[in-house]
Structure formats: structure tokens, C-alpha cells
Image (spheres, grey):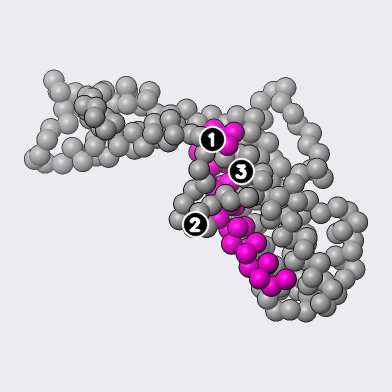
Amino acid sequence: MDMAKDPRGHKPLRARSGRLLAAASAAGLLLVLAGCQGDGGTSAAKDGQDVVIAPGRPGEQSRTLSPEQAAEEQPDDSPNAADHAYVQGMIEHHRQALTMSALAPTRASAEGVKRLAERIAAAQKPEIGAMEAWVDRHPAPAGGSGAHDHGAMPGMATEQQLRELAGAAGADFDRLFLKLMTAHHEGALKMAGQALAGGNNVAVEEMATEVVATQTAEIHRMRAMG
């Protein structure tokens, strides 16, 4: 699944050009307003009132708006069902990755596997915190689906696989850890892709994009180690 051309430089492509253009336009409004408040230069006032110069799209003229009108043109990024499903699911998905990674310090034999597990834990612990904070700010709407079959999420290890991993040691642990964690990361990419394609909230988009970037790089690393 090719979700990112550059793990750190480019977001995955998705059919959301209208919302991104709106966001870019809104950012332009603020920049123009800020740039017009200094001494000299073009005035940002009309009839004694502050105004905002809204840059037009290519071939279109700029518009003069009041601050209230500019605020109304901010894009609506209210969370939708895809946003809620992604965040709630990814919290549990990350928690399983932490459970698996916590075994590595005492079970793994390869230093590379131990360092990888440390990096996964260091990245995903704060991500869980950020997603839990998002859930607190955006409670699921009444009547929404509150129960989730977390075991059915892409890439999740089964209880039997987790027991096998906990019982393995040395090179056997290393091989099984890399196998399960690669599948786990691939599942996370699928979930992030669904959020990027169907979600509406900018914060969720940013979280999903970070997952794609980080875990794509880690998949390449694990395949090279396996």
C-alpha cells in the first residue's frame, strides 16, 4: 500500500482538494491581515473598520471581507464517523504494539530488535496520549457505535500469537516479533488510509499522516532486518 511518496515530506494523496484549498485560503486571509497592520504600506482599513484581503484563486481577483466574514469562511473540520472510528481503533492498535514491544528487552537477542522496540514504544506512547486527549475533546455523538471489535482491526495479533511471542526467546523471538510487528504496522497503514480518505477533521488527518510516515519507515527497516 503506497501511502506516502516521502515518509517525512509528503502527505498521502486523497480526494480533499476543496477542503485543503479552503484551509489554504483561510491561512492566506490571516497572513494578509497580519501583514497589513504595520505602519506604512497598504492600509487594512475601510471606513474606519478593519478588513481582510482574501487572495483569489489563480485568475480570480482578491476580495475584501470583514473579519467576521473571513471567520465564517474557515473550513468546517467537524469530526465525522471515520474520524471517530480511526482514533478509537488506533488507540487499541497502538496499545497492542506497546504490549509486544515491552517483551523485547528481556526476550530479544538482536540489539537491532531491541532498539526498534524502544523506538516503537517511544513514538506510540505519546500518540496514544494525543488520541485520548482528542477523544476527550470530541466525544462520540449520541447513538454512535460505542463498541468495537478490536480483534478484527487490520494487523492485530491474535491472543494465540501473543502467547507464542511471550513464550519465545532469542532468535525465535526476533523472527516472530518482526513478522507480527510488520503485519501490525501494515494494518495501521490501512486504518490511516481509511481515515485520510473518509475523515474530515484536520487533527485526525495530521495524526494519520504521522502514522503513515513513521510506520512506513519502520516497515522498511523491519523487512531489512528479517
Mark 1, residues whose alpha carbon is within 10 Å: few (<14), some, or many (≥20)?
some
Mark 3, residues whose alpha carbon is within 10 Å: few (<14), some, or many (≥20)?
many
Left or right relative to 8: residue 119: right
Residue at (62% x, 57% y) in the render: 215
Asked if disc 1 and disc 2 are in contact, CB closer than 8 Å, the reply is no
Q: Is residue 201 above or below residue 185?
A: above
Residue in the foreground of this view, choosing between 179 and 211: 179
Element at label 3: helix
Residue at (78% x, 79% y) in the render: 109
What count of labels does the image hold? 3
Element at label 2: loop
Q: CA distance from mark 1 to mark 3?
A: 14 Å
Residue 45: in magenta span: no
Mark 2, residues whose alpha carbon is within 10 Å: few (<14), some, or many (≥20)?
few
Q: Which is more foreground, mark 1 or mark 2?
A: 2
Q: CA distance from mark 1 to mark 2?
A: 23 Å
Q: Position of residue 52 (x, y in %)?
A: 24, 29
User: Mark 2 highlights which residue?
Assistant: 6
Residue at (86% x, 52% y) in the render: 158
**What amino acid does circle 1 point to?**
Asn
Left or right relative to 123: residue 62: left
In the rendered structure, which segment of residues is drawn in magenta? 197-226
Which badge, 3 or 2, is on the more N-terminal residue? 2
User: Mark 3 highlights which residue?
Assistant: 193
Which badge, 1 or 2, is on the more N-terminal residue? 2
Q: Position of residue 210 (x, y in %)?
A: 55, 52
Residue 224: in magenta span: yes
Quadrant containing the C terminus is bottom right
Residue in the foreground of this view, choosing between 22 and 138: 22
Q: Which is more foreground, mark 1 or mark 3?
A: 3
Q: Which mark is residue 201?
A: 1
Q: Position of residue 38 (x, y in %)?
A: 15, 41
